[in-house]
Image (tube, rainbow, N blue to C red):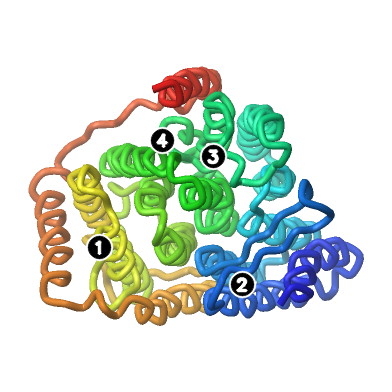
Amino acid sequence: MNPLTIIWIALPFLIGFSIYLLPKVDRVLAILIALFSLGYGFTAVLLPEPLTLHLLDQFGVTLIVDQTSGYFILTNAIVTTAVILYCWAQQKSAFFYTQMIILHGSVNAAFIGADLISLYVALEVISIAAFLLVAYPRSDRAIWVGLRYLFISNIAMLFYLVGAILVYQANQSFAFAGLANAPPEAIALISLGLLTKGGIFVSGLWLPLTHSESETPVSALLSGVVIKAGVFPLVRMALLVPDIEPLVRLFGVCTALLGVGYAIFEKDTKRMLAFHTVSQLGFVLAAPPVAGFYALTHGLVKSALFLIAGNLPSRNFKALKTLPLATPLWGALAIASFSISGVPLLSGFGAKVLTMKNLLPWQVIGMNVAALGTAISFAKFIFLPRSSEGQMKLKPGFWPAIMLLLGGLVVANIVYYDAYTLKNLLKPLLTIALGWLLYLLVIQRITWKLPRYFEQFDHLIGVMSLMLTALFWWGVI
C-alpha cells in the first residue's frame, strides 16, 4: 500500500503537466487519473487500520490514509470524473485539463496530509490551480473573481503559516499531533487560515460570489470538492486533538445556520447553491467522527445541482416559475434536492441521520433548525413547474455526468442502512413536510433581499481580524 500511495500522489502532477504536452489525449489522461483515484479511494475506505507514512525524517512529511480520508478521496474522484464527462464535447483546451488534474492531485494531497507544512503546500497549489480555472474564460469579471479568491486565500494562508511556525517552535515538529501542546495563538492563527480557506462561517463569505460566478463545471468542482480541502484538516485536527473538537463543532453549527439563513431568501439559483455549500460544510464539521460520509454525499449532490443549475433557462427563481422545465431535467433536479433534504432511499438521508446521532446535546436544536432550512431552500427547486413539452437544451456531456453523480447517491445509500428504522424515517419526513409547507405558505411570498455587505472584499479582510480576535479569546479561556 505504501508504494501505491506514493504513486497515487505523484501521478496527477506528472500526468497534469504531460497533458499540456499531449493535447490530443488530454481528456483520456484526465479521466484515467480520476478513475485511478476512484480505485484508491475505495481501497482507503476499506482499510482495516489507518496507514501512516513518514517521509524524509520525523520533521518531514507525514501522511495518514484512513476511512475518513477515503470518503473525501472518493468524493474528489467521482466529482472530477463527472466534470470531465460534462466537459468532454465542449472543446476545452489542454490547459483546462492540466489545471483540473493538478487541482485534483493537490486536493488528494490535502486529504492525506498530517503535517502542517505539506498541507500548506497542497493548499497553496490548490489556490493557484483554482484561480486559473475560475479565470479560464479570461473575461474581466472572471479574472476579478479569480483574483479576489486568490488574494483572500493567500492572506488566510499567511496567518496559517505563522501558526505552523509557532507549533514547530513549541514541539520541534510540524505534525498535527503537536497542536495539543501548541500555544493558544498558534491554534488561533491556524484555525483562521483553515476556516477562511474552507468557507466556514463569516470568514467564508467570499464563497458565494466565487462559486456562483464561475463557469458551470468549475462551480461543480469548487463546491463539490475544492472547498473541502480546507475543511478536512479541521476534521482531522478535531479527531486528533480533543481540545479542538468543541471549537470545530461550534463553528459547524454556526456555519450551518448562517449559510441556510442566506439560502432561504436568495433569489438567484447559483448563489442559493453557493450559500448552501456554506451551510452543508457546517454539517460536515458538526460531527467530526462521521464527517467523511456526509462530505461524500454533499460533494455528489452539490456538484449535480451546480451542473443542473447551469443548464436551467434562467438563474432567477421568479423567472423559472414562468418557464416550465422539461420533465427529465426537473426529475434530475428533484432527485438531487430530495437527497440534500434527507429523503429516504438516497444517501443524503443516511448521512443526515448519522450526523444527527453524533451531535452533542447543545448542538441538536441548531442543527435541526438548519435541516428545516435546507428543506425550505430546496422546495424552491422541487416546486418549479414542469412539462413534457418543456425546452431542454443541454450540454452533450450533461446526462453521463448527472447519471454518475445521482447513481452515486443511490449506491452510497447502502453505507448506513441501519438508518432505516421507523423513528429515523419519521423525523426527516416530518421536517421536510414542514419545510415545504413553510415555503408554500410563507417564504415564497417574501421579497426580502439580504445585503451583501460582508461579501465585499475590504469587509472580508476586516472580518478576518475580528475572527482572529475571537479565536484568541477562545484560546485564552
Do the CB atoms of the residues marked 4 and 3 lie less than 8 Å apart?
A: no
Horizontal and vertical percent position of residue 37 = 66, 73
Q: Quadrant of residue 33?
A: bottom right
According to the picture, the residue beneath numbered tag 2 turns out to be 81
- Whether 154 is drawn above or below 329: the answer is above
- Whether 107 is drawn above or below 180: the answer is below
Closer to us: 173 or 82: 173
Q: Earlier in the sequence, mark 1 or mark 3?
A: 3
Looking at the rendered image, the disc whose residue lies closer to the viewer, 4 or 1, is: 4
According to the picture, the residue beneath numbered tag 4 turns out to be 201
Separation of residues labelled 1 and 3 (CA atoms): 46 Å
Separation of residues labelled 4 and 3 (CA atoms): 24 Å
Identify the residue shown where x is 53% and y is 66%. 75
State left or right for residue 463 relative to residue 272. right
Do the CB atoms of the residues marked 2 and 1 lie less than 8 Å apart?
A: no
According to the picture, the residue beneath numbered tag 1 turns out to be 382
Separation of residues labelled 2 and 1 (CA atoms): 27 Å
- Whether 270 is drawn above or below 191: the answer is below
Horizontal and vertical percent position of residue 67 = 52, 69
Q: Earlier in the sequence, mark 4 or mark 2?
A: 2
Looking at the rendered image, the disc whose residue lies closer to the viewer, 1 or 3, is: 3
Q: Earlier in the sequence, mark 2 or mark 3?
A: 2
